[in-house]
Amino acid sequence: MAKQGNQDRIAVLGLGYVGLPLAVALARAGLDTVGFDTDSTHIAALRQGHDRNGEVSGASLRAAGTRFADDPADLEGCTAFIIAVPTPITDAKTPDLEPLRAACRTIAPYLHKDAMVVVESTVYPGVTEDVCGPVLAALSGLVLYDDIKLAYSPERVNPGDAEHSLQDVVKIISAQDEDTLDRVEAIYAPVVKAGLHRAGSIMTAEAAKVIENTQRDLNIALVNEFSLIFSRLGLDTLEVLEAAGTKWNFLPFRPGLVGGHCIGVDPYYLTYRAEQLGYRPEVILAGRRINDQMGKHVSHELIKALLARGANLAQARVLVMGFTFKENCADTRNTRVADIVTELEAYSMRPDVYDPWVDADSIAHEYGITPIATPETGVYDAIIVAVAHKEFTDMGAAAIRALGKPGAVLYDIKGIFGKSGADLRL
């Protein structure tokens, strides 16, 4: 029998925003933990105490005692495998499960009787058992549910948010049976101080995860649609929301760009599975269509404002401040700011992109955009504050306006400077 509970030797696969904090927390709690990633450069940096995403400090990396590995052979002897790899979508807006399958293929040769595999990646209901399980069994030669124990515990990581860390957010756990669920609980209980919620089944936990962000996506889509309507009425959306918010049960959502690894992706996992079952989810897909067009809407509003000032679009200089999918983090996955840049380029404009949080090389590789190191002063015809980084809020509207020419258009997407601080906002 494999060692039970917190006596397991644990491997965490995928050391990004989800896996790295988990691997560090488990090791800090005294659990024997290997952190595995296929990116050798990333592993080398972690061994030197550097997290390229800025989520885990060097001191925490050094103090935790996590062993970092990029050689699959280092997985030998592990009894519990936690998979925390990305689950993105394809260009066709369908689930891309290849990273998850690849992780299963990697660990399969190192599975022994009573090995436990816990999936943390966001998936649609059924993936852990119907996709991961068969791969693990076929490549290991072991019997699923007998020799290999399956579990699912969805991540609830919010990049750049120190207030809602791994230990501070209730974590859902699920497994194939009660004994395996007890084993999962023994692993996570020492690091999740907010408590654990034991779901009734793996599919229940998978479904719970995928609807968390779908609900938020739809609420943002609703206020984004409000914004589209109110812009045609000449109304200030944030003023309307402030007035409506005086009612006790009005939800405080605000318009904005919806990107990132969760909200802009997870709904497509649920809709994909629904359509496989013969049901077309009209409301969820409508929300996705609205949110996916907001970058184009921002660009068109800016272009109209420039044309109203008599600007020549081909010669107009535009500064886009912020490129990450949200404020105060380096994460650019599925950022919708890219849509703004693409749309402006379609009108023969060449915007400067400035973001003090991003790695310039990774942006150039992923999006074909080379961000500038520092904005020039007094040269821009328009400035878009796309992300509410603390550096930008600290600057204030006047200092940002000083980057532009006299009379330059300031588009404050997040509304961080108030109505009088900008010419345009969602």
Image (cartoon, rainbow, N blue to C red):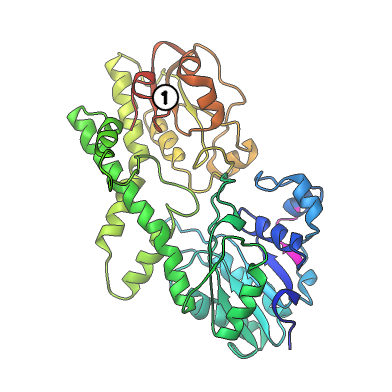
Q: Quadrant of residue 363?
A: top right
Q: Residues within 10 Å of mark 1 (few under 14, many from 20)?
A: some
Using the image as rendered, state which of residue 127 and residue 59 is in the foreground.
59
351 lies left or right of 33: left
Q: Quadrant of residue 151?
A: bottom right
Using the image as rendered, state which of residue 39 and residue 285 is in the foreground.
285
Position in image of residue 419 (x %, y %): 34, 23
Residue found at the far front of this picture = 248
Count all numbered tags in the image, as a single digit.
1
Region of the chain picked out in magenta, as a range: 32-40
* Picture quarter with the C terminus: top left
The answer to whether residue 255 shows anywhere in this view is yes
The answer to whether residue 37 shows anywhere in this view is no
- Location of residue 378 with respect to 424 vertically, above or below: above
Residue beneath label 1, please?
417
Task: Name the residue rendered at 60%, 22% in the picture.
Answer: 374
Residue type marked 1: Phe
